[in-house]
Amino acid sequence: MCAGRMETLKEETATRKIPSLLGLALNSLLTTHGWSARELSAKASVAPSTISAYIWEDALTRERLEELAGLMDLGPADVERAILAARLVLPPPPAPWSPVDPTPAERRIDEKAAAMTAGELIDVVLDVRLREVRQEKRRLGLEEGQRLSRELKTFSPSDRRALIEATPDYQHWGLAYVLCSESEAAAPRDPGKALELAELSLFVARHVGLEEPGSELFRSRLEGWCTGFVGNAQRVIGSDLPGAERSFGGAWRLWDAGEDPAGLLSKAYLLDMEASLRRDQRLFPRALKLHEDSLALARPEEVGVIRLNQGFTLNESGDHEGALRSLERAAQVIDGDRQPRLRFGLRFNQASTLCALMRAGEAVPLVEEVRGLAERLRNEIDLLKTLWLEGNCLAGLGQREAALAKLEQVRREFEGRQHPFDYALASLDVAVLYREQGRFPEIKVLADEMLEIFKAQQVHREAIGAVILFQEAAAKEQVTKELVRRLKAYLSKAEGNPKLAFDE
């Protein structure tokens, strides 16, 4: 290359313009948001040369940069990002020389590491902040849902849907979520109310008014969540397990079609509810697989209730030892002070399982705790089931007369409440004790009363047929423990399955 050309290149390099830090930030904002310098100058009512000076001549202040960003409908966060990007791109000013400075190669490595760290830090800060904002807005959304639910209760059931349909304030995801929770809480004592609340939650979900991009995907997932609670309520009612199965099929279709990036809704919970349905359908391997799938996805606060349900499924399948192991694992995470209802279910199932394993002595302290929890919860059905548990525990301890007194009280209470299947199951517990004492005439009376109650309360034909067989065996004094065991197992299943026949 000739000497003249070399000198020219040196001059060009020496005169090459480098924007200031804030000028480069302004240029970045213009470029990334699709503005031209001429458009901004018109918006700011200044000459285009002024914008050029801002970029190239170190004539821009931080305050003026924020003003210009505001004219482009950009905020302080956009300005901060643009300044950071400019810092990463512009070469740093040279530090005062020292004989122990890094070499140019070492400096380039350090600068690269610093740039990479800054980029990663942005992602970390944004991720942390996003989680914090989502958690806070979730809390506020659920509080709003509780408030709206209280307001809804002041209206008649016939007016609630019209109000939801006509009032945007009630078209709120938090309200749908809270109604689902209330449905679940109502299920043990009032399945009909549970279904009403779940269906109302689904109605809310279908009207949730979200306008942001992607909101229809969240709405689909919310509808799937609420549909699962409809299926759960149908399961608890017991007379429509096929309907519950259809509901869960619809729930999963809606769930899979949607998205919930903030994790407001729990797939683990939905899986566990379906597991309860499969248990009631006596599909135990499928139910247990669903419990395991649920545990794999569960949040820490969900593990206790899933383990509890898993224990119940194992008990129903006849694996009492496996049930005890699952319940013990549930005991490690269920806090009795904060979760008294879960603690009640846990201790109740542990005591029942021990009695089934002929280990009533070990169940005694658990039964005492169950009694205390039932009295604290003040639910009549809980107290009645606790009395039933006490009767069976006394029977396991050989205290037959004390056991009979409690079990007789239980079956009469169920008769008055028109719970024919619970009445029959308690009566069969009494029949076992009568059988041990050779009191066959009393067993015949029990059988006659069971049949009368079933007919009066219009229990389905297959269950009536099973009780007739029991009545015939009682009349012949041929009732055995095995017959009672099989009949109890049948009646436990038949309440939710009217087509199920008793296997003689």
Image (cartoon, helix red, strand yellow):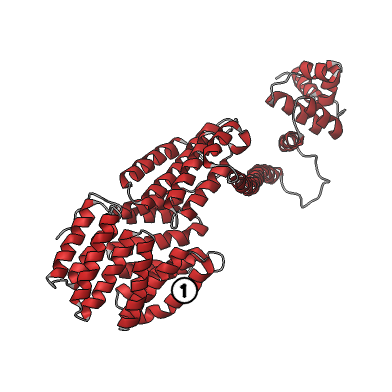
Residue 485 appearing in the image? no
Q: Secondary structure at mark 1?
A: helix
Amino acid of disc 1: Arg
Horizontal side of 115 relative to 315 (left or right) equals right
Q: Quadrant of residue 13?
A: top right
Q: Quadrant of residue 361?
A: bottom left
Residue placed at 54% from the left, 33% from the top?
A: 207
Horizontal side of 229 relative to 215 (left or right) equals left
In this rendering, the count of numbered labels is 1
Residue placed at 87% from the left, 18% from the top?
A: 46
378 or 80: which is nearer to us? 378
Residue placed at 26% from the left, 63% from the top?
A: 450
Measured along the vertical axis of the image, is residue 150 above or below residue 81?
A: below
Q: Position of residue 254 (x, y in %)?
A: 43, 37
The quadrant of the rendering that contains the C terminus is bottom left
169 or 449: which is nearer to us? 449
477 or 483: which is nearer to us? 477
Q: Position of residue 409 (x, y in %)?
A: 37, 72
Residue placed at 53% from the left, 69% from the top?
A: 376
Single out the residue that lies furthest toward the left. Answer: 476
The quadrant of the rendering that contains the N terminus is top right
26 or 126: which is nearer to us? 126
Q: Position of residue 300 (x, y in %)?
A: 51, 59
Label 1 Cα neighbours within 10 Å, binned few <14 / some 14-19 / many ≥20: many
Residue 301 appearing in the image? yes
Residue receiving disc 1: 371
Q: Position of residue 461 (x, y in %)?
A: 22, 51
